[in-house]
Image (cartoon, rainbow, N blue to C red):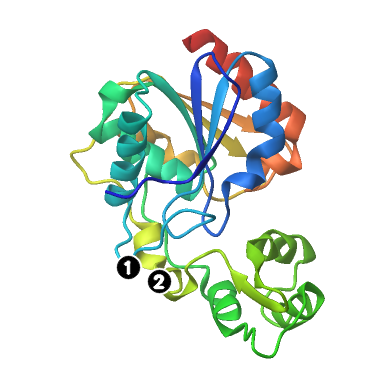
Amino acid sequence: MKLLHSNIIGDSGCDLLILHGFLGMSDNWKTHAKNWSSLGFRVHLIDQRNHGRSFWSTAFSYDLMADDIAHYCETHQLQEVLILGHSMGGKTAMHLACKYPHLLKAIVIADIAPKKYAPHHQKILQGLSDLDFNQIKSRTESDIFLSSYVTEPGVRMFLLKNLYWVEPGKLGLRINIEVLKDASDAIGKNLSDDAQSLLPCLFVKGELSDYILESDTPLIKHYFPNAEQVTIAEAGHWLHAEKPKLFFDIVTDWLTLQI
């Protein structure tokens, strides 16, 4: 079984694994990781399969991604870890908590619920898929091309972090776009009805995001009876980037209570 790529920040302390969202990568969380490391956590910034510097595979599901994290923990001899997952990473963390609870101490879920989501990334995925690096030779050209698919500059900046130089003069994408462009159903999949975890769990929602609704509370409690919920005011889906200090303080205070 292949091992996920990670960047480990800190030499000792309680292990905190951070799982990025769809089309993201572990580097998105580096600033928070350094801050948690300074507080005594050993932070594992992990690239999930088909993302960042981790392996590519045509097989893609939350069940497999949970297996990947379990294999990572076993390989690094980690026990009673803390997990923080955003969006897709949060769904991976939920599956992990239900399937491998013995590996975990507590989980934090950032702005995602255990429900099914309708596909809603199609235009972004089409734009990334249509990038032709035989014609496009710079990040600026990539941004201009992608702007006809994605109007928000901040979203394009996030997506274009996936660009890298395959060789001098030749750009490529770190994400496996050929697999991910057809992964909308897998990304939106809900937890199975019989899944459940009694682990301590914190769901952090962005006030301006519609990923977690008030009506989702009974569902969250069904899967995670010990879940707590908190809302960050004036924050959207990328709450950790939009309100970084408040997000950091809320998560830190909660995690400290779990150690």
Of residues 152 and 11, the one drawn nearer to the viewer in this rendering: 11
**Residue positioned most to the left:** 194
Mark 2 surroundings within 10 Å by alpha-carbon count, few (fewer than 14), some (14 through 19), many (20 or more): some
Mark 1 is on which residue type? Thr
Residue at (29%, 46%) from the top-left corner?
Answer: 191
**Residue positioned most to the front:** 168
Q: Which mark is residue 179?
A: 2
Classify residue 162 by image quadrant. Answer: bottom right
Rendered position, 31 above or below 259: below
How far from the left and from the top, in percent, is residue 164?
A: 66, 66
Q: Is residue 84 left or right of residue 96?
A: right
Classify residue 66 by image quadrant. Answer: top left
Q: CA distance from mark 2 to mark 1?
A: 6 Å
Q: Are marks 2 and 1 in contact (CB under 8 Å)?
A: yes
For the image, the number of numbered tags is 2
N-terminal label among 2 and 1: 1
Residue at (69%, 90%) from the top-left corner?
Answer: 135
Residue at (79%, 66%) from the top-left corner?
Answer: 153
Q: Would you name the residue on which mark 1 appears?
A: 58
Determine if residue 9 is in view: yes
Residue at (39%, 67%) from the top-left corner?
Answer: 183
How far from the left and from the top, in percent, is residue 47?
A: 50, 48
